[in-house]
Image (cartoon, rainbow, N blue to C red):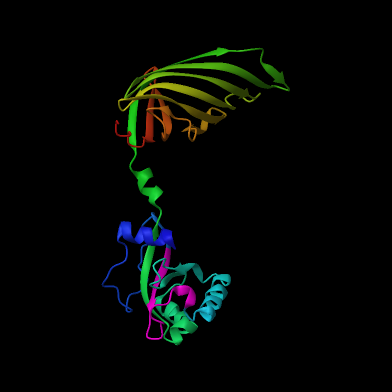
């Protein structure tokens, strides 16, 4: 419950003008909405014993009721406020009428020990906003591959290890060095590769390094899937916390990259 209170205080998501006539908000078009719930704030009622903490209030049957509803999947979270001024419950229902029906069955509310205030509440996926605040770095690179070891060919399918080197120019300036494993088949134009590349350089004025994980395929000359993703928590130095994905384009005899990334703000100098 402490976490719920912190969110309420910091984000101010509970309006003081909320009324019992409110209904569940319709935010189905908002991709950041993680859940639709009802927050019920329980404050002392006329039967509340003044001067007594929550633990000494007549709430035993209330606790059993909450446990029963929790077991039924109707309650998501519940608990008392630490200042002995009541508590709160998060109900998972489709309408405020259903929540009010459940509240009417709560012994503490029926006996006047607690008085409920219902707030429709949208729980947002805040990582969605972080992901939406992405930046693009674009430029060119020059690759160079060299074989390492003898190819392993069996039944027309060949596996081959290669060393990978790149030089990046543009919004990101640096170099990449990695190891690649390629697989070719007897069918012309059908192949795949995986690789890990350690990239070192400067991005948005910050120097550091990170790992790129490659995975790609081609079927009979038609490109299949290609992903080049930053390995989680691989960023170092000024690029610590880097997340992103790189796309590659070819044409005019060269290679271009489009790196879509998020990077935490640099810490303030001490």
Question: Where in the figure is residue 201, as x and y percent of width and height?
Answer: 38, 21
Q: Nearer the viewer, residue 192 or 198?
A: 198
Question: Where in the figure is residue 110, as x and y percent of width and height?
Answer: 45, 86
Question: Where in the figure is residue 3, as x and y percent of width and height?
Answer: 42, 58
Q: Is residue 28 visible?
A: no
Residue furthest to the left: 17
Asked where in the image residue 137 lies, by quadrant, the reply is top left
Residue furthest to the front: 51
Residue at image point 39% right, 26% down: 257
Horizontal side of 24 relative to 60 (left or right) equals left
Residue at image point 45% right, 22% down: 199
* Magenta stretch holds residue 104: no
Position of 30 relative to 46 (above/below): above
Q: Where the N terminus falls, by quadrant?
A: bottom left
Position of 114 relative to 4 (above/below): below
Horizontal side of 65 relative to 250 (left or right) equals right
Question: Where in the figure is residue 4, as x and y percent of width and height?
Answer: 41, 61
For the magenta stretch, what is the residue range?
36-56
Position of 252 relative to 111 (above/below): above
Q: Nearer the viewer, residue 131 or 119?
A: 119
Q: Is residue 201 visible?
A: yes
Horizontal side of 188 relative to 168 (left or right) equals right
């Amino acid at each position: 419950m402490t976490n719920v209170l912190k969110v309420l205080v910091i984000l101010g998501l509970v309006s003081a003008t909320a009324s019992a006539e409110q209904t569940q908000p319709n935010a189905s078009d908002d991709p950041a909405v993680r859940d639709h719930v009802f927050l019920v704030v329980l404050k002392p009622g006329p039967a509340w014993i003044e001067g007594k903490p929550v633990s000494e209030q007549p709430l035993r049957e209330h606790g059993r009721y909450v446990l029963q509803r929790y077991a039924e999947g109707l309650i998501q979270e519940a608990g008392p406020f630490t200042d002995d001024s009541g508590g709160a419950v998060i109900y998972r229902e489709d309408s405020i009428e259903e929540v009010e029906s459940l509240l009417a069955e709560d012994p503490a509310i029926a006996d006047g020990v607690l008085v409920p205030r219902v707030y429709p509440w949208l729980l947002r996926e805040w990582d969605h906003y972080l992901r939406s605040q992405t930046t693009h770095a674009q430029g060119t690179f020059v690759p160079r591959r060299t074989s390492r070891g003898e190819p392993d060919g069996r039944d027309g399918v060949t596996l081959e290890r290669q060393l990978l080197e790149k030089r990046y120019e543009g919004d990101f300036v640096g170099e990449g060095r990695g190891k690649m494993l390629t697989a070719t088949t007897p069918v012309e134009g059908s192949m795949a590769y995986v690789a890990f590349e350690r990239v070192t350089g400067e991005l948005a004025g910050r120097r550091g390094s990170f790992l790129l994980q490659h995975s790609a395929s081609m079927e009979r000359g038609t490109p299949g899937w290609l992903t080049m993703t930053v390995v989680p928590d691989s960023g170092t130095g000024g690029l610590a916390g880097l997340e992103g994905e790189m796309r590659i384009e070819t044409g005019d005899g060269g290679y271009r990259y489009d790196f879509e990334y998020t990077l935490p703000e640099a810490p303030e100098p001490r």
